[in-house]
Image (cartoon, rainbow, N blue to C red):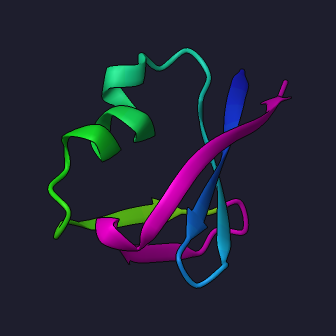
């Protein structure tokens, strides 16, 4: 299985790295959820270390892609 790694850049300088199924359609994944969410929405992310983050959408500066991780 392959996973896309996303870097979520926050306004305080923190970066949250998350994994998402590589074959997931964009509209159903992180980017689709982000685009549809109102600015006051509290977004929930599970990071690569297993921690859960609750982040208001308005605190997200940008989202960038990184590597693709393949797990057998």
Return the x and y of residue 64 as percentages of the image width and height: 64, 43
Return the x and y of residue 4 as percentages of the image width and height: 68, 32
36 within the magenta span:
no
Residue sitting farthest toward the bottom: 12
The residue depicted at 16 percent of the width and 70 percent of the height is 40
Q: Is residue 52 left or right of residue 51?
A: left
Whether 65 is drawn above or below 22: the answer is: below
Return the x and y of residue 56 as percentages of the image width and height: 31, 74
Q: Is residue 64 left or right of residue 40?
A: right
Q: Could you say which quadrant of the image residue 8 lies in?
A: bottom right
Whether 14 is drawn above or below 2: the answer is: below
The residue depicted at 32 percent of the width and 69 percent of the height is 58
Q: Is residue 30 left or right of residue 6?
A: left
Return the x and y of residue 39 as percentages of the image width and height: 20, 63
Q: Is residue 24 left or right of residue 67?
A: left
Whether 57 is drawn above or below 20: the answer is: below
The residue depicted at 59 percent of the width and 75 percent of the height is 51
- Secondary structure mostly seen in magenta is strand
Q: Which residues are magenta?
A: 48-72
62 within the magenta span:
yes
The residue depicted at 50 percent of the width and 73 percent of the height is 52
Location of the N terminus (image quadrant): top right
Location of the C terminus (image quadrant): top right
* Number of on-image labels: 0
């Amino acid at each position: 299985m392959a996973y896309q790694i996303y870097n979520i850049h926050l306004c305080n300088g923190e970066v949250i790295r998350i994994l998402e199924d590589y074959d997931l359609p964009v509209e159903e994944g992180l980017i689709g959820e982000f685009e549809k969410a109102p600015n006051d929405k509290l977004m929930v992310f599970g990071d690569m270390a297993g921690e859960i983050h609750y982040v208001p959408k308005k605190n997200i500066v940008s989202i960038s892609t990184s590597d693709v991780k393949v797990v057998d």
